[in-house]
Amino acid sequence: MEFAFYLAAAVAVVSTLRVVTSINPVHALLYLIVSLIAVAMVFFALGAPFAGVLEIIVYAGAIMVLFVFVVMMLNLGQAAVEQESSWLNPKMWIGPSILVGIMLVMMIVALFASPVEGTITGELIDAKGVGVALFGPYVLMVELASMLLLGALVTAYHLGRDDTLRPARDMNERRQHLTRDHRGTRQ
């Protein structure tokens, strides 16, 4: 199980790097699907098949289909490709690379500073265990995540709405005005 865990983790890291560095948005989406499936494999290797199946169904399935439709609808063209190419300038990667290096050092120190007490056992965690954990000690985190998602939903609505639409009152006034004009032309 440990071999599958490390292999899936390596695939997830490499495909996620390709998501970030890919110029073509469709290729980036395909690499993101590979990354999400690799993360699902990590869940399977850790003994959480419920989380792995949810990862595949929700993220690699539904959300990625939504992303593909958005990319197809936007049809950004050559200007977007040129802008993304300018983002791949090596000077722009210095700051994020330093931050990632600091996090990598912190992770390595945290992993090797404490003694390893066990290995991956492959013990299965069923849906009931996930529910008890989520709505037991982690209920505050679940509620905070739901509030964050609600805020994102409201923000997406306000960003995506059409400001050119008039309220119903204005539409009724226009309808009455058109009716008066129409009556005047018949006489």
Image: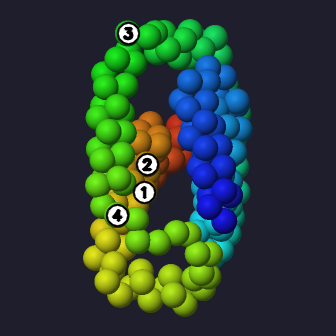
Check the picture and name the quadrant holding the C terminus: top right
Q: At 41% from the left edge and 80% from the top edge, which residue is drawn?
A: 134
Tell me the kind of residue under disc 2.
Ala
Residue type marked 3: Lys
In front of the other: label 4 or label 1? 4
Indicate the position of residue 172 as horizontal and vertical percent values.
45, 52
Marks 2/3: CA–CA distance: 32 Å
Q: Nearer the viewer, residue 142 or 92?
A: 92
Residue at x 29% of width, y 35% of height: 102
Q: Amino acid at mark 4?
A: Pro
- Pick whichever of labels 4 and 1 is earlier in the sequence: 4
Colour setup of the view: rainbow
Foreground mark, 2 or 4, reads 4
Label 4 Cα neighbours within 10 Å, binned few <14 / some 14-19 / many ≥20: few
Front disc: 4 or 3 = 4
**Residue to which mark 3 is pinned:** 91
Q: Does residue 144 appear left or right of residue 132 in this picture?
A: left
Which residue corresponds to mark 1?
A: 153
